[in-house]
């Protein structure tokens, strides 16, 4: 009986020991995998935000949060970019911005909420404020639209005073206040309301024509123009000459006339006339008798070589006798 009880205790102890060892083995085996999969220990990649254009934005486009979107990337964005759509709102584009391209600070103007209009003016243009006595004469326009302004003088003569004026402020910004409705009388003693104003950018010559038309009492009418097409020069990359300028042409170190081109003969002075060309002489044909009696040409003896020299102040020519003449002597 005691032996059976001893075997029972021994088997129970071995069973407990096996269970404990198995639990420790599985715990040590699963702990590294669980640690690798835990989100707390995993490294978090830093992501950067950058504002890009949703569609193609031509120059002088008033930006709104709907025209841009925010994209995230793991690489840091270029400098002078925006991170929020509210940062680019109420700004005008200076250049063409393609869809998907980031918007840089030098491509847009300062916010228009600051009350400044000078950054919106293109180079070589001025801003002109035109009072709108009749609001219905101006079609619905927004900032950046192109309009053509016509002036009507005495209902007889029509003259365009601005061909491509850029709207800088207009539409809802220059509309008359809507609080005053038809049938409501204004309180007595209140100052008269000023008419709405349209601010456009034109050339200095067109600004003078608009001022003269307004002062002459002409009626101004406005026609909306389509946006300008994209110029091919905005899409092509810059060349090396445009970036660094053309290289200066260096003269050759040893200038020499090219062999293919003959040297030009010096022209005669203006006072002296050039000599006429020689007239060729034509001899009459010889008779057959003259051909028979024609003397045979004799070989000419070589002329003695001459040596030129200077004796004192006079040039001297010395002749050297030929070997045949020496033998004859």
Image: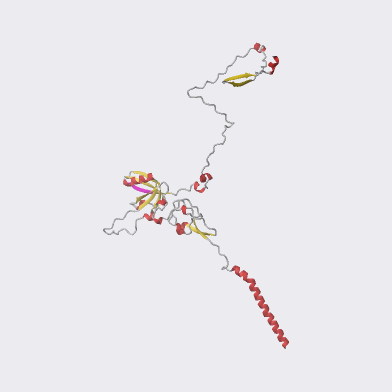
Q: Would residue 191 appear left or right of 116 to someone viewing this image?
A: left
In the depicted structure, whether residue 149 falls above or below residue 250: below
Give the position of the C terminus as an image quadrant. Answer: top right
Label count reads 0
Instruction: Tell me, yes or no, whether the highlighted magenta stretch contains residue 221.
Output: yes
The stretch in magenta equals: 218-222
The residue lying toward the viewer, choosing from 146 and 42, is 42
Instruction: Tell me, yes or no, whether the highlighted magenta stretch contains residue 200.
Output: no
Q: Residue at x 66, y 77 (%)?
A: 20
On the image, the x and y values in percent for residue 69 come to 49, 58
On the image, the x and y values in percent for residue 71 come to 51, 59
Q: Residue furthest bottom?
A: 1
The quarter holding residue 260 reads top right
In the depicted structure, whether residue 193 falls above or below residue 17: above
The residue lying toward the viewer, choosing from 105 and 327, is 327
Query: Which coloring applies here?
Result: secondary structure
Q: Would residue 152 appear left or right of 100 to someone viewing this image?
A: left
Q: Residue furthest front?
A: 312
Q: Residue at x 50, y 46 (%)?
A: 233
On the image, the x and y values in percent for residue 261 come to 57, 30
In the depicted structure, whether residue 66 falls above or below residue 122: below
Give the position of the N terminus as an image quadrant. Answer: bottom right
On the image, the x and y values in percent for residue 134 come to 33, 52
The quarter holding residue 3 reads bottom right
The residue lying toward the viewer, choosing from 201 and 275, is 275
Q: Main secondary structure of the magenta part?
A: strand
């Amino acid at each position: 009986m005691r032996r059976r009880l001893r075997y029972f205790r021994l088997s129970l102890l071995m069973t407990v020991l096996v269970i404990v060892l198995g639990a420790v083995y599985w715990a040590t085996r699963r702990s590294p995998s669980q640690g690798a999969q835990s989100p707390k220990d995993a490294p978090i990649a830093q992501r950067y935000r950058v504002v890009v254009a949703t569609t193609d934005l031509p120059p002088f486009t008033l930006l709104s949060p709907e025209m841009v979107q925010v994209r995230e990337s793991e690489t840091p964005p270029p400098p002078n970019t925006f991170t929020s759509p509210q940062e680019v709102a109420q700004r005008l584009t200076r250049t063409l911005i393609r869809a998907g391209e980031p918007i840089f600070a030098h491509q847009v103007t300062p916010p228009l909420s600051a009350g400044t209009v000078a950054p919106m003016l293109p180079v070589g243009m001025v801003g002109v404020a035109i009072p709108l006595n009749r609001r219905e004469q101006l079609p619905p326009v927004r900032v950046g639209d192109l309009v053509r302004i016509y002036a009507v003088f005495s209902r007889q003569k029509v003259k365009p005073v601005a061909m491509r004026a850029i709207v800088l402020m207009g539409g809802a910004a220059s509309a008359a206040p809507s609080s005053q409705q038809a049938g409501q009388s204004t309180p007595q003693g209140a100052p008269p309301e000023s008419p709405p104003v349209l601010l456009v950018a034109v050339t200095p010559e067109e600004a003078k024509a608009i001022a003269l038309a307004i002062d002459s009492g002409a009626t101004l009418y406005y026609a909306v123009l389509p946006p300008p097409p994209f110029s091919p020069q905005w899409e092509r990359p810059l060349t090396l000459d445009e970036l660094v300028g053309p290289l200066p042409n260096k003269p050759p170190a040893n200038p020499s006339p090219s062999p293919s081109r003959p040297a030009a003969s010096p022209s005669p002075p203006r006072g002296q006339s050039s000599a006429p060309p020689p007239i060729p002489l034509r001899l009459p044909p010889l008779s057959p008798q003259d051909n028979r009696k024609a003397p045979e040409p004799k070989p000419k003896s070589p002329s003695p070589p001459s040596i030129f020299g200077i004796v004192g102040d006079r040039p001297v020519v010395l002749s050297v006798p030929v070997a045949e003449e020496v033998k004859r002597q």
